Amino acid sequence: KADNLVIQGCTIGEIQNHGITNHLAYHPAGTEPRLKNLVIKDNKVYNTCLENPKKSGQGISVAADGFLVSGNEVWGCKDIGIDIWLGATHGEVVDNWVHDNAMGMYVDGARYVRIHRNRMNANRRTGLTVSSEDPAFTTRHIWIFNNLSYDHTAGDGMSMWDNSGIGATDVLFANNTLLNNRSTFTFFGRGNTAELMNNLGYATGLATYDESARSSYAMHDNLWLTSPTGFVSASGKDFRLTSSSPAINKGKALPVLRDDLGNTYAISTDYQGLGRAVSAAPDAGAYELQ
């Protein structure tokens, strides 16, 4: 049994299948991961899944109990940039840059995961997707906040889908900035539940697109723009707010997050790690005007 592993400062590229992964061949379906306390930090992973005929695989793939995926750059992957899957629990995905992959980030079969301060851009299908593919590993309590997802011109900023019939449940999308995507949010499958609040989006198509069934989405205090205005430089990818931005004071205080171990996480900072609600109310999107 291998626990307490750190993979840091590596450059991994031109790989036929996965870049960095903890293998699950001896992980029985429906049981907790055997590997605990995994850190994958400050790596560069590129051009993976090159010889996989199905183009299925990941730049970084994690299924551990207690994990940190931080400060990585992942690009050029024929499938998923960062994949959190099949029993992954009690983890954090923060400060990563995931770009020019088939898909940016994918969450499937995970629980109690915080995903924040990540930058996802120019992936072909979507910036981030939350799914529930395997009935043995239910997806729940996934918290996605203070992220940037932009320039998915043929895809979606963020999405949910399910083909297990169980659905991904108790998902929070909050204070994300999503610009120049075909759709800001899309929803497919059955049995999903999510709350969307304080998000700031501009889509070239629809703000939200929903083909799901038996699903429930609480959407409030989001701001869908009709043009990419109110930013320091939208064309220059500087999505900090200007003093005239319509996103100012448009949000509400976020709930305190709680996991099944008794830990609590208060979301009091923005994408830059600076304080929220410096005026009357928090701003919509990933940045708070300082």
Image: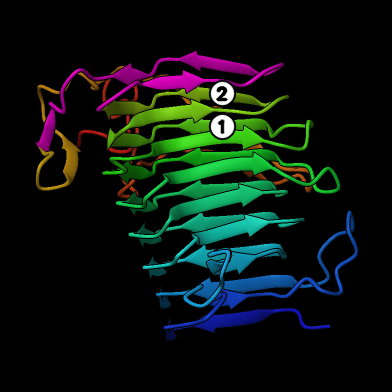
Task: Reply above or below: 80 against 246.
Answer: below
Q: Residues within 10 Å of mark 2 (few under 14, many from 20)?
A: some
Q: Nearer the viewer, residue 84 or 265?
A: 84
Name the residue tied to disc 1. Answer: 172
Q: Is 3 covered by the magenta stretch?
A: no
The tag earlier along the polypeptide, 2 or 1, is 1
| Percent coordinates x, y for residue 177 in the rendering | 32, 35
Q: Amino acid at mark 1?
A: Leu
Q: Amino acid at mark 2?
A: Glu
The colouring scheme, among rainbow, by chain, secondary structure or one colour, is rainbow
Q: Mark 2 and mark 1 in contact? Answer it, CB < 8 Å.
A: yes
Name the residue tied to disc 2. Answer: 195
| Percent coordinates x, y for residue 41 in the rendering | 48, 73
Task: Reply above or below: 55 against 105.
Answer: below
Residue 1: numbered disc: none
SS at mark 2 in the image: strand
The quarter of the picture where residue 278 lies is top left
Q: Quadrant of the C terminus?
A: top left
CA distance separating discs 2 and 1: 5 Å
| Percent coordinates x, y for residue 271 in the rendering | 33, 46
Q: Which residues are magenta?
A: 204-232
Residue drawn at x 51%, y 40% as measured from the top left? 144
Q: Quadrant of the N terminus?
A: bottom right
Residue drawn at x 68%, y 38% as measured from the top left? 141
Q: Is residue 265 visible?
A: no
Count of numbered tags: 2
